[in-house]
């Protein structure tokens, strides 16, 4: 009875740990998707800004903008581009950390599943031994 109770407790703890790990992995997966989407939006924005800068440069060479306006816009665009680049690096770092966390959680979930499988195997062995002992006791009576 004590072995059965310990097994049930261990199995319950493993199940709870697996549920917690699965929830954490799901949360990390959602964060990964969000980070990837943000990274894609940032890359698109950077591409648009570069295209705009190139367009402004072409217009300047055609004499449509004066040199001061172009220099100011180019400077502003360069600062925006640098800021976007820094944000992209931060998002890439966050994405990397989230992927590492997800891999760690998946490994934990595998370990919990292995522990639950081992607990089930041990329970089965204990039950078989209990039945055998009960059978021997019945023969001795």
Image (cartoon, grey):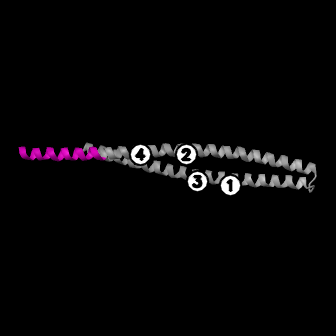
Question: Residue 8 at x, y = what percent?
Answer: 31, 47
Q: Which one is earlier in the sequence, the residue at label 2 or at label 3?
A: 3
Q: Are marks 4 and 2 in contact (CB under 8 Å)?
A: no
Residue, disc 2: 99
Mark 1, residue position: 41
Verify CB contact (< 8 Å) between mark 2 and mark 3.
Answer: no
Find disc 4 in the rendering and name its residue.
Answer: 110
Q: Nearer the viewer, mark 4 or mark 1?
A: 1
The CA distance from mark 2 to mark 3 is: 10 Å
Kind of element beneath mark 2: helix
Q: Earlier in the sequence, mark 1 or mark 3?
A: 3
- Alpha-carbon neighbours of circle 3 within 10 Å: few (<14), some, or many (≥20)? few
Mark 1 surroundings within 10 Å by alpha-carbon count, few (fewer than 14), some (14 through 19), many (20 or more) = few
Cα distance, mark 4 to mark 1?
Answer: 34 Å
Q: CA distance from mark 4 to mark 2?
A: 16 Å
Q: Is residue 50 above or below residue 3?
A: below
Counting from the top left corner in percent of width and height, residue 122 is at 27, 43
Q: Looking at the rendered structure, which numbered label has been put on residue 3?
A: none
User: Is disc 1 placed on a helix, strand or loop?
Assistant: helix
119 lies left or right of 32 = left
Who comes first in sequence, dot 4 or dot 1?
Answer: 1
Q: Is residue 113 left or right of residue 123?
A: right
Q: What is the CA distance from the residue labelled 1 to the residue labelled 3?
A: 12 Å
């Amino acid at each position: 009875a004590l072995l059965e109770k310990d097994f049930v407790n261990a199995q319950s703890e493993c199940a709870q740990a697996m549920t917690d790990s699965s929830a954490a992995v799901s949360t990390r997966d959602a964060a990964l998707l969000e980070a990837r989407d943000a990274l894609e939006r940032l890359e698109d924005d950077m591409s648009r800004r570069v295209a705009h800068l190139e367009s402004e440069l072409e217009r300047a060479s055609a004499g449509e903008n004066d040199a001061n306006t172009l220099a100011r816009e180019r400077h502003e665009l360069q600062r925006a581009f640098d800021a976007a680049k820094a944000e992209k690096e931060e998002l890439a770092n966050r994405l990397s950390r989230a992927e590492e966390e997800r891999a760690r959680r998946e490994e934990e979930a595998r370990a919990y599943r292995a522990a639950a499988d081992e607990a089930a195997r041990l329970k089965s062995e204990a039950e078989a031994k209990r039945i055998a002992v009960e059978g021997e006791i019945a023969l001795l009576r």
